[in-house]
């Protein structure tokens, strides 16, 4: 996956990505040049997306929905993390070195996938981890924005790292420990410094992971899961508070920043959109994502509804099924032993992934070019549920 992304980044050279939101990339490159030239305190640390002439015709510089005039246009409605990373790479490699800029998100993605593989192998075993990663390979959305300079690749990579920590904390370890909570808080903070959209995924992924544990009802177990949620909420929330402070400093006051945020919120929740959905309201947006966007080759490349239906139907089989392994030197007894809470875990992951679409309908309606990736969580939880339902034990011999 990473090799494919490096190859694509090399092929794009000094050009914007055709997959990873060229609009956002152009904005971040110009804002990154501003920070590289004037320091990270320029414009109170907020990205000036109209700075300079890089990719002049791309992005929001000449989009009057974003910039009334193509100068002094400071973007207030997203944390500046991705602009900071471009600024850092601009200082290292100079202006225009777009391929070199991509090495940072690619490196973050490689580390995230490697850490998640380690955590999965420690929790569900190497064979099951390999099966999960085959699904990742089949679903392009897990990696095809990894090279992006905008925040989308970073956000997904950070969420994969968070899941890795949660697996070690809630499934591998007997209890949640302070290093787990510190790691979750740090990852959530960085994710919050990149974007808003992953708020529900970052905050509540611990819940479906907790439901995969055998002793999920034990007080120590659910308290540990609750501490994980609190740590993630605290980290993400701190990043948003700091961003609000930046906006307050730029606009001249806290009340002005809140008024600006409320105005943007009203637009993004129920504002006008040019999208036409199958039905009106929340269900229209969700159906658009489930039936139209997610099956596309850019995202899952297979039916989301079919995948969820197949997995939940298999998990609904309450009878234990056992069969001997074939072809292995050492014979094993393979059994299928699902639990109802696995289906609940998948349902919760669907609710979490759909949270942004429910709250921010207008924003979700016009950003279908990257938001379907929020449903990565459903795929991972479903595969973990399948793995937890499969058990292999050595087959007893007559001499035993």
Image (cartoon, rainbow, N blue to C red):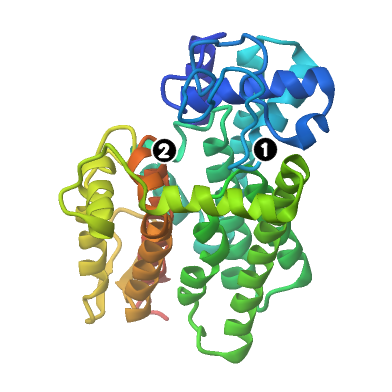
Q: Is residue 297 left or right of residue 269?
A: left
Residue depicted at x 50% and y 77%:
213
Give the camera-side residue of 398 and 395. Answer: 395
Q: Is residue 398 left or right of residue 250?
A: left
Q: Is residue 118 visible?
A: no
Residue depicted at x 51% and y 83%:
216
- Which mark identifies residue 305? none
- Which mark identifies residue 80? 1
Q: Position of residue 339 (x, y in %)?
A: 34, 79
SS for tag 2?
loop
Looking at the image, is 260 positioned above or below residue 355? Answer: above
Q: Is residue 165 visible?
A: yes
For the residues marked 2 and 1, what is the alpha-carbon distance in whole angstroms? 18 Å
Q: Position of residue 169 (x, y in %)?
A: 64, 69
Q: Are marks 2 and 1 in contact (CB under 8 Å)?
A: no
Quadrant where the image shows the C terminus: bottom left
At label 1, counting other C-alpha atoms closer than 10 Å, the crowd grade (few under 14, some 14-19, many 20 or more) is many
Looking at the image, is 281 positioned above or below residue 190? Answer: below
Q: Position of residue 313 (x, y in %)?
A: 20, 68
- Which mark identifies residue 370? 2
Which callout, 2 or 1, points at the residue further toward the start of the chain? Answer: 1
Q: Is residue 305 left or right of residue 96?
A: left
SS for tag 1?
loop
Q: Position of residue 167 (x, y in %)?
A: 57, 64
Image quadrant where residue 184 sits: bottom right
Looking at the image, is 333 positioned above or below residue 145? Answer: below
Residue depicted at x 62% and y 31%:
105
Q: How many marks?
A: 2
Give the camera-side residue of 336 and 51. Answer: 51
Residue depicted at x 72% and y 32%:
84
Give the camera-side residue of 328 and 158. Answer: 158
């Amino acid at each position: 996956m990473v090799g494919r992304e490096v190859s694509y980044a090399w092929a794009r050279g000094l050009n914007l990505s055709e997959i990873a939101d060229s609009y956002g990339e152009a904005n971040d490159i110009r804002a990154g040049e501003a920070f590289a030239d004037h320091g990270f305190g320029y414009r109170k640390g907020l990205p000036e997306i109209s700075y300079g002439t890089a990719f002049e015709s791309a992005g929001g510089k000449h989009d009057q929905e974003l910039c009334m005039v193509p100068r002094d246009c400071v973007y207030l409605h997203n944390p500046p993390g991705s602009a900071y990373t471009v600024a850092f790479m601009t200082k290292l490699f100079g202006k225009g070195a777009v391929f070199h800029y991509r090495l940072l998100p690619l490196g973050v993605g490689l580390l995230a996938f490697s850490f998640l593989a380690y955590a999965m192998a420690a929790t569900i075993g190497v064979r099951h981890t390999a099966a999960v990663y085959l699904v990742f390979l089949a679903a392009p959305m897990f990696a095809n924005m990894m090279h992006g300079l905008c925040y989308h690749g970073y956000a997904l990579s950070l969420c994969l790292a968070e899941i890795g920590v949660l697996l070690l904390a809630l499934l591998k370890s007997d209890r949640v420990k302070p290093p787990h909570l510190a790691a979750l808080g740090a990852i959530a903070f960085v994710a919050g410094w990149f974007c808003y959209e992953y708020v529900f995924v970052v905050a509540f992924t611990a819940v479906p992971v907790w439901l995969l544990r055998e002793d999920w009802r034990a007080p120590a177990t659910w308290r540990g899961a609750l501490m994980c949620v609190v740590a993630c909420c605290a980290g993400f929330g701190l990043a948003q508070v700091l961003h609000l402070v930046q906006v307050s400093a730029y606009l001249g006051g806290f009340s002005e920043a809140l008024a600006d945020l409320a105005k943007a919120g009203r637009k993004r929740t129920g504002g006008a959109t040019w999208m036409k959905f199958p039905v009106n309201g929340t269900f229209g947006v969700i159906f658009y994502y489930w039936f139209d966007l997610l099956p596309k080759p850019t995202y899952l490349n297979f039916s989301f509804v079919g995948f969820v239906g197949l997995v939940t139907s298999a998990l609904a089989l309450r009878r234990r099924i056992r069969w001997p392994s074939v072809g292995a030197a050492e014979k094993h007894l393979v059994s299928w032993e699902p639990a109802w809470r696995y289906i609940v875990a998948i349902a919760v992951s669907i609710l979490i992934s759909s949270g942004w679409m429910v709250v921010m309908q207008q924003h979700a309606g016009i950003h279908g070019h990257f938001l379907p990736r929020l449903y990565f969580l459903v795929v991972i939880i479903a595969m973990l549920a399948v793995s937890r339902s499969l058990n292999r034990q050595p087959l007893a011999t007559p001499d035993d």
